[in-house]
Amino acid sequence: MAKPLTDSEKRKQISVRGIAGLGDVAEVRKSFNRHLHFTLVKDRNVATPRDYFFALAHTVRDHLVGRWIRTQQHYYERDPKRIYYLSLEFYMGRTLQNTMVNLGLQNACDEAIYQLGLDLEELEEIEEDAGLGNGGLGRLAACFLDSMATLGLAAYGYGIRYEFGIFNQKIVNGWQVEEADDWLRYGNPWEKARPEYMLPVHFYGRVEHTPEGVRWLDTQVVLAMPYDTPVPGYRNNTVNTMRLWSAKAPNDFKLHDFNVGGYIEAVLDRNLAENISRVLYPNDNFFEGKELRLKQEYFVVAATLQDIIRRFKSSKFGCRDPVRTCFETFSDKVAIQLNDTHPALAIPELMRILVDVEKVDWDKAWEITKKTCAYTNHTVLPEALERWPVSMFEKLLPRHLEIIYAINQRHLDHVASLFPGDVDCLRRMSVIEEGDCKRINMAHLCVIGSHAVNGVARIHSEIVKQSVFKDFYELEPEKFQNKTNGITPRRWLLLCNPGLADTIVEKIGEGFLTDLSQLKKLLPLVNDEALIRDVAKVKQENKLKFSAFLEKEYKVKINPSSMFDVHVKRIHEYKRQLLNCLHIITLYNRIKKDPTKAFVPRTVMIGGKAAPGYHMAKMIIKLVTSIGNVVNHDPVVGDRLKVIFLENYRVSLAEKVIPAADLSQQISTAGTEASGTGNMKFMLNGALTIGTMDGANVEMAEEAGAENLFIFGMRVEDVEALDRKGYNAREYYDRLPELKQAVDQISSGFFSPKDPDCFRDIVNMLLNHDRFKVFADYEAYVACQAQVDQLYRNPREWTKKVIRNIACSGKFSSDRTITEYARDIWGVEPSDLQIPPPNLPKD
């Protein structure tokens, strides 16, 4: 095979990376050298690769600040309705390349860095991921920020600046080991501390009811220090803000207490307050009712609401009365979107501020709160729903508990007036769950306190209405909406797969980058020989590049002409990595049984983190690595089957593996994956999907035609029917010899010869209490995988299906998703207005 162009040579041919004008290149070089000089004057006289990275980051950052200031000035003058996206997670990944892409600086930087004898891609690899999220929910927030800026919305992301993000995953002897993610160790060039906007947040204390109103007294104060990160839109000169709060102890912390001579202890105890923003809770789709987590949730909400109200009051056209105590227009100027129930305390906190502080009467305050807030539901798994003990609230947030009780009382009075005597309905719809431990159901609080509630894919939004919030839907059907998730095509196509982006640009122009529905223009070209050849060639180059990466980083050699079968997402029973394992073992057994037969070679890659306390998920990782140990060292198998566990899966690794994938596994039990967004990334990057009719897979099949995906297994109705009948795993185990063989091998220690009992918990779960019915879909899954092999043998037909998928992926842009939120929930219109760049006058 002819040696492919080097990345550097290829990149220069790619038009969408911006024009490298001579002036631009000279300007970047000059700026880079200036930043490098100041770095070295301060410290050393020999530059390290990290020095070069920081010099480049600061150079690129210089191009942001003028646009950032001008955008914020523009909002101040026009006073649009502001959108506040509240999330405990923002899974941003790396920022350098994304900023260059959105500012159109990539080719200029590439050329300047090349002229200085450096390699841009090597510098990009030095940057730490900002891993302030667990998975889908946090990454969705990041895509939404990109789309809101690109659509010219006056939007702000508000969250927590965790000192330690999602742990780094090491695999030791096949087991996951967690390592702290000290992502700020070398500093963060993209953030700007704003101590002038520091705000107090109160905890504990007691409530006093006086004729003048309610007072929350004797509280402990923690300060919230904001750090701002710029969020550039795609080539529209808009730069929005993500503001993350960090906890600081006040200087008199613990010193006013009566501790005689306890000065040193008091200063050391500052850590207790500052622990609030220390670490991200590493659970995905699981609720852990820890007090520190509740503190985090209130911390971000209390700081953010003070900020929102300050900005509302000081806005140029906010309110006519001089001291701006009039909140009539609040919901016309402010929209608050709650990313799951984690920021649900925004509802009682806004009520507390309006009623206790601003002296608005209760009914008016409640009307304002409901018109302002909207809630996105992300999961139907019962173990993921937040249900906080009342006793914890009593201690930590006594006034909020009173407010929640009052909200609930009025709500239940209303329900009782509609359904007199139906006590069961009242019990089901209450915010307070009675029982041995009284709990607050945060999802119920969100539904009651919001004017809009949405699911994140059509099938999920239906389940939300038909089961999770059925009573609420029957009460207020107009409140419930669907907003199918999306991904930003800037990071997830242009940045991670420039070869494919350029192939598309050659055929249909650049318009698809801000209007992804234009990919439909590829449909008439599905038989175009040049396009088929180019799409296949780009995929092969991406596979070669990823193979080289795996060999360099993990010392594993793989066959780049094998099918890259990729299953990357958080490890969870409902996502059914175990179903994939059973298929791998079945393939292995078939090769062993008939070694002379022609098999389609596969490299199966499984990656993802397990929550540190989730025993079964950690066992699943050990099983994958153990299967790999057997399969990869069996000479009979050769390079027809390889099993790789992708260590430390994260945003920056997704950007490498997704463009190289041939097959995307989306195999959750129907009715469990709310949407999924990885599925969309694979579709856009030229992989075919094997999946169940779950989450957004349903809409992907609808857009591309079910015949262009590999759909298998039970539908939601079948799962429900099986539940009514009673799922009996042994029935499948006894009936399907290949399944029995695979399970017996896991059980007998075939994959763990040194510890034959290693996987007994997995086998026991699969046979006796598998909530996610792995065996029920095994037969259909293995048959479907055979169809995958069949098509892969015909590269031309495979690539035509790939092109059809890419052409039909336009719906899954987060630009479309955010446009729907803007129109249907926030009541604002996206604008394609270009703010003039800083080097031009304003008008």
Image (cartoon, grey):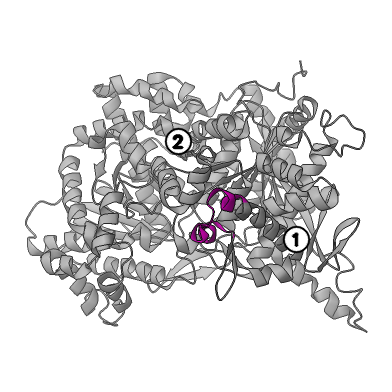
Q: Quadrant of the C terminus?
A: top right
Which disc, if any, is residue 493? 2
Task: Quickly name the residue at label 1.
Answer: 247
Q: Quadrant of residue 314?
A: top right
The overriding secondary structure of the stretch rendered in magenta is: helix
Residue 233 visible to an observer of this rendering: no
Residue 343 shown left or right of residue 648 in the figure: right
Of helix, strand and loop, which one carries label 2? helix
Residue 103 visible to an observer of this rendering: yes
Residue at the front extreme of this rendering: 421
Q: Residue at x 47, y 36 (%)?
A: 8
Q: Amino acid at mark 2?
A: Leu
Q: Quadrant of the N terminus?
A: top left
Residue 392 shown left or right of residue 261 in the figure: left
Q: Quadrant of residue 233?
A: top right
* Coordinates of residue 522 in the picture (x, y in percent): 34, 23
Q: Amino acid at mark 1?
A: Ala
* Coordinates of residue 727 in the picture (x, y in percent): 24, 65
Q: Residue at x 76, y 28 (%)?
A: 79
